Amino acid sequence: MDEFVAKSQLSVIFLCDRLRFLSYRIRGLRDVQKVNANIRIQLDQMTQALIKVGLGSYPNAKVADWSFVHDDPQYASILSSLEELVREDSQLGQQAHEYATSLMNRFGALDGQDFGERASLQFKYVLEETVLSLIMTEIRGYNVEIYRRGMGFVDFLYSGRRGDLMRLLNKSTLDRRFVSIGSESASRTASR
């Protein structure tokens, strides 16, 4: 935390209960009350762990969940525009579907669960994860994104479809910098 949070003007540690909810659905769990209860427990545990490692000593940091972006009309607008873009651009749509399919095993599934339903939910997860990243970095201005792994589709868009992203976001430049936890660039970025 010292490397990034202490050196930032404002840091948000985003614990996305919406993506967790989709991951439970991808695994075939249908009891919404039980899923939501499990997610609340997980978010509480993660928040407490962050406090234990000192997050509370940084007045510039906060922990946020889905409510942080849920009512933002830009989220719905960008998600709708991205869905339209992947429908209309066959290459982009194929890339998004391939990425979603490659992630199917990440969450596992219950025996007998319908593959088509899982694939549809995984595709939704990929698009919502992408839009969440775009909202947090390009719209809300948290331009350094630290994540435990590459984010796949959003990384593909930044590396190969920057023009589409700029049109989608109505921006002339893109501001996001991605730092994978544990990478050498994490230390270099933190020292800037």
Image (cartoon, rainbow, N blue to C red):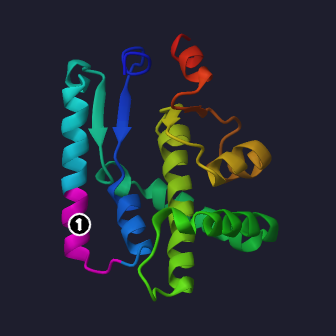
Percent coordinates x, y for residue 105 in the rendering: 54, 67
Q: Mark 1 belongs to which amino acid?
A: Asn
Name the secondary structure under disc 1.
helix
Q: Judge whether residue 71 can be spotted in this image.
A: no
User: Which residue is farthest front?
Assistant: 111
Residue ID at (39%, 78%): 28
Please state if 176 lies on the left or on the right of 23 as rendered: right
Q: How many marks?
A: 1
Question: In the depicted view, which residue is nearer to us: 37 or 90?
Answer: 37
The image shows residue 174, relative to residue 35, as above or below, that is above
Q: Is residue 149 magenta?
A: no
Q: Where is residue 94, by image quadrant?
A: bottom right
**What's the magenta region?**
29-40
Mark 1 is surrounded, within 10 Å at the Cα level, by few (under 14), some (14 to 19) or many (20 or more) other residues, namely some
Residue ID at (56%, 11%): 192
Q: Is residue 35 magenta?
A: yes
Question: In the depicted view, which residue is nearer to us: 79 or 108?
Answer: 108
User: Looking at the figure, which quarter contains the N terminus?
Assistant: top left
- Look at mark 1 in the image and give the residue it sits on: 36
Please state if 89 lies on the left or on the right of 77 as rendered: right
